[in-house]
Amino acid sequence: MRKLILLFVLLPVLGLSQLKKEEKALVKAVDSRHSAALELLKKAVNINSGTMNFKGVRKVGSLFMEELKALGFEVRWSSGDAFNRAGHLIAVHKGKGKKILLIGHLDTVFEEDSPFQSYKMLNDSIMHGPGASDMKGGDVVIILAMQALHDAGLLKDLTIEIVMTGDEELNGEPIELSKKDIVDAAIRADIALGYEDGDGDVQEVEDAEEENLHLT
């Protein structure tokens, strides 16, 4: 898994001739699924999943659960009734070796009454949309990484748990219940990776009314 992460980081500066056989297989798998991943992201962004829109959060969760189920993950929805939120997506792939936890979230700050509700492409490489980078883009990267590992024949040996929470933007209460699933997963894990990211600009974004995701 660490090799996959490094591969994704280094791909822009590496030539294919420098990659090993399994790494080339991953590159090929990512390339072949790129268009489908972009369509998945557009579909997810167009579903309003403001934290308090429980139906929308669950709908995005269901969308991603179907993708992970197709790869052999055991998927379930952890109800948020006890802490007044939609709940969390939990997906587990049982293999061997180190236990890896991948973290995302399904909710956004853009509730149903927000005027910002759908994606549009600003050019051929930048998507503008609610939650495009924070963090449905990161969720789709998780899924694309799992698909690439599956297509390259590498997923079958890995032990991976994915937790995508439904209340990252506005925590449910009591917090010991709202965060129980992710805390329990972290205790089980040897390695944990969070996939929330932006456009590479480390300066804090002051205006949260717009989100752009750079796709290159």
Image (spheres, helix red, strand yellow):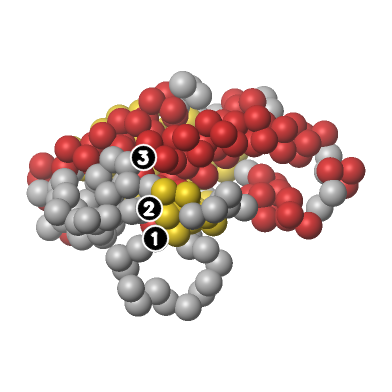
Local packing at callout 1 (Cα closer than 10 Å; few below 14, some 14-19, many 20+) is many
Residue of label 3: 44
In the image, 215: left or right of 194?
A: right
Q: CA distance from mark 1 to mark 3?
A: 14 Å
Residue at disc 1, secondary structure: loop
**Between discs 1 and 2, the one toward the N terminus:** 2
| Residue 104 visible in this rendered orientation of the protein | no
Q: In what quadrant of the picture does the N terminus appear?
A: top right
Disc on the earlier residue, 1 or 3:
3
Q: For the residue labelled by badge 2, is the local secondary structure a helix, a strand or a loop?
A: loop
Rendered residue at 72%/33% (across/down): 28
* Depth check, front residue: 108 or 184: 108
Q: Quadrant of residue 55?
A: top left
Nearer the observer, 129 or 154: 129
Residue at 60%, 27% (x, y): give it.
Answer: 150
Residue hosting label 2: 129
Three-letter code, disc 1: Glu
- Is there CB contact under 8 Å for labels 2 and 3? no
Disc ID at residue 11 = none
Name the residue carrying label 1: 211
Residue 11 locus on image (x, y percent) = 73, 51
Local secondary structure at mark 3:
helix
Name which residue type carries label 3: Ala
Tell me whether the residue at label 1 lies in contact with that at label 2, contact meaning CB atoms closer than 8 angstroms. yes
Disc 2/disc 3 C-alpha distance (Å) = 10 Å
Q: CA distance from mark 1 to mark 2?
A: 6 Å
Residue depicted at x 52% and y 63% = 199
